[in-house]
Image (cartoon, rainbow, N blue to C red):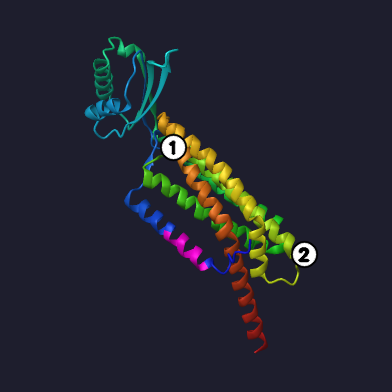
Amino acid sequence: MNIDFVGKRKWFYIFSSALILISVVSFFTKGFQQDIEFSGGTVIDINLPVAVNNNDVEALVRQYAPNSEPRIQKSDKIDENGRIVSSGVSISCNALEEEQKNNIITAIGEKYEVENIEELATFRTVKPTFGTEMKNRAIKATVLAVIAIIIYIALAFRKVGGISAGVTATLALCHDLIIMIAVYSLCGLPLNTTFVAALLTILGYSVNDTVVIYDRIRENKNLHRKMEDKELINLSINQSLRRTIFTSISVTVALAIIFGFSTYFKVTTMQRFALPLLVGMVIGTYTSICLASNLWYDWRRISDQNAKNKRVAKKA
């Protein structure tokens, strides 16, 4: 293939700028929903000997705690005939008072005609200080991962740009992170440890694709020493294109299947993990092919022009 990626970079920049703008607007308008792991709150676990409906449980919680923002997770026990015989329900919500807890438990017991509901329920309280500590650890993990990526790429590709390659790859990663965080904001997904795991997964995948293309640039630079940067980058991306797209398709199909099954069977935890990964995989592939190398090209072009201007100024 012979696609002029560098020549079309302005269109890629416009598209990426539009995505970032939509993301920033979402951050300020819709905001973020923090899970109990980060914000603190109350967890109610109930093992019910009957089948329950998530929406009914959520309605009961909201009836007695309107501002609790409940999130319901359910695990069903199925007999040999495929019928649901019991349900384990976990209710995560904002901090509840003792009276609210008792009212919610009583209401669920009456709804599903369970007499000994108090014996089947347990309560846990997650303090905000614990949530803050978890959030700080997540931020540190992400920052350390980005710093490690910059150092690795700068050392590995010191002969074809060094620090410029590391910084531009990191800028491309930041683009991926912003888009992925926007998915959580737009879809109302809660920020929790699953979010951090998905974030770091996409970081690793995206930088792997970028490193493959950078490595191809390094090899071609040794083979074609007189080739200009624009031709060199286009050649390297086109040579890596089939491998990158086929790998991305295989992973994307797998994630799409996971997301489809988790949606069909209402496995909320898996669904909230698969959707951001699915979006992040597509965006990460686009970034590796269309953005990272073009950013590096413009960095080199501007640096060379500035160096040339300084030499001219000295001679004058």
User: Which numbered disc, 2 or 1, marks the residue closer to the eye?
Assistant: 2
Instruction: State which quadrant residue 304 falls in.
Output: bottom right
Q: Is residue 271 left or right of residue 197?
A: left
Q: Label 2 is placed on what type of residue?
A: Leu
Residue 279 in sight: yes
Span shown in magenta: 10-18
Secondary structure state at the residue bearing disc 2: helix
Q: Would you place residue 266 above or below residue 166 in this image?
A: above
Q: Can you name the residue that lies furthest to the right here? A: 223
Q: Nearer the viewer, residue 280 or 83?
A: 83
Residue 11 included in the magenta stretch of the image: yes
Residue shown at 57% from the left, 42% from the top: 251
Q: Which residue corresponds to mark 1?
A: 272
Residue shown at 76% from the left, 69% from the top: 225
Numbered circle sitting on residue 223: 2
Find residue 50 and report its horizontal and vertical position in percent: 34, 15
Location of the C terminus (image quadrant): bottom right
Within 10 Å of disc 1 (Cα), the crowding (few <14, some 14-19, many 20+) is: many
Instruction: State which quadrant residue 41 falls in.
Output: top left
Find residue 127 and report its horizontal and vertical position in percent: 39, 31
